[in-house]
Image (spheres, rainbow, N blue to C red):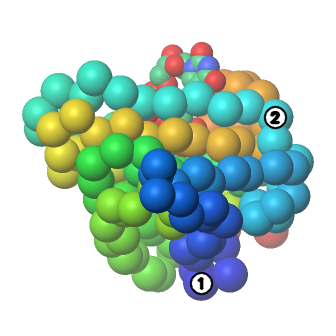
């Protein structure tokens, strides 16, 4: 799973007025940006995700607060806690993700390589496994 999931450091301009971080196409992310969305006003105890993407790559950034991302491949599973707005989680294609334990007031920014397309989603775990095992 390691080549498809990793923390990417986002450039940070430190300043006595506060920090500024920036992302442009291909820097520091390895794809061209085609969709940007954010998840916010998340009620306590909510869980999101619960799917994989066939082709889409993305970077998840905890702009505020923190949350856990559970990542599953065919044989491996790991949980990553995201809590710094200058560290994003890159997730490549065909990785199952679940997002949980959102802290109060957390905001998750998602930068994605493709526009929203429901046919790119695998929302059933068994279907995800079958898709991965397909020759
Ligand atoms: C992902 C995680 C991290 C749109 O209409 N346009 C969009 O650009 C997106 C991303 C979603 N939608 C619609 C599709 C659903 O009717 O918004 C609704 C909620 O989407 P979903 O249940 O997939 O939300 P999450 O938070 O479970 O997943 C989202 C992204 O969909 C997904 O790509 O990896 O955030």
Point 34% across, 44% down: residue: 64
Left of 132 or right of it: where is 88? left
In the image, residue 52 lies at what x, y percent?
56, 50
Whether 135 is drawn above or below 85: the answer is below
Whether 110 is drawn above or below 97: the answer is above
Label ID, residue 34: 2
Left of 40 or right of it: where is 55? right
In this view, which residue lies farthest toward the front?
16
Label 1 C-beta lies within 8 Å of the nearest ligand 1 atom: no
How dense is the environment of label 1, judged by Cα within 10 Å: few (below 14), some, or many (20 and up)? Answer: few
Quarter location, residue 121: top right
Residue 128 or 61: which is nearer the viewer? 61
In the image, residue 76 lies at what x, y percent?
44, 81
How dense is the environment of label 2, judged by Cα within 10 Å: few (below 14), some, or many (20 and up)? Answer: few
From where the camera sits, is residue 94 visible? no
For label 1, the SS is loop
Residue, disc 1: 2
Point 82% across, 49% down: residue: 24
Point 39% across, 76% down: residue: 77
Label ID, residue 59: none
In the image, residue 37 lies at what x, y percent?
58, 29
Point 81% across, 42% down: residue: 33
For label 2, the SS is loop
**Quarter of the N terminus within the rendering:** bottom right
In the image, residue 89 lies at what x, y percent?
53, 63
Label 2 C-beta lies within 8 Å of the nearest ligand 1 atom: no
**Quarter of the C terminus within the rendering:** bottom right
* Mark 2–mark 1 distance (CA, rounded to whole Å): 24 Å
């Amino acid at each position: 799973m390691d080549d498809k999931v990793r923390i990417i450091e986002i450039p940070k301009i430190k300043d006595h007025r506060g920090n500024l971080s920036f992302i442009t196409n291909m820097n520091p992310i390895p794809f061209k940006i085609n969709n940007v969305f954010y998840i916010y006003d998340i009620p306590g105890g909510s869980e999101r995700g619960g799917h994989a993407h066939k082709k889409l790559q993305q970077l998840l950034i905890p702009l505020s607060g923190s949350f856990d991302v559970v990542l599953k491949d065919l044989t491996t599973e790991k949980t990553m806690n995201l809590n710094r707005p200058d560290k994003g989680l890159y997730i490549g294609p065909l990785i199952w993700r679940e997002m949980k334990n959102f802290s109060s007031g957390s905001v998750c920014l998602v930068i994605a390589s493709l526009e929203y397309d429901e046919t790119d989603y695998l929302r059933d775990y068994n279907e995800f496994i079958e898709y991965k095992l397909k020759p």
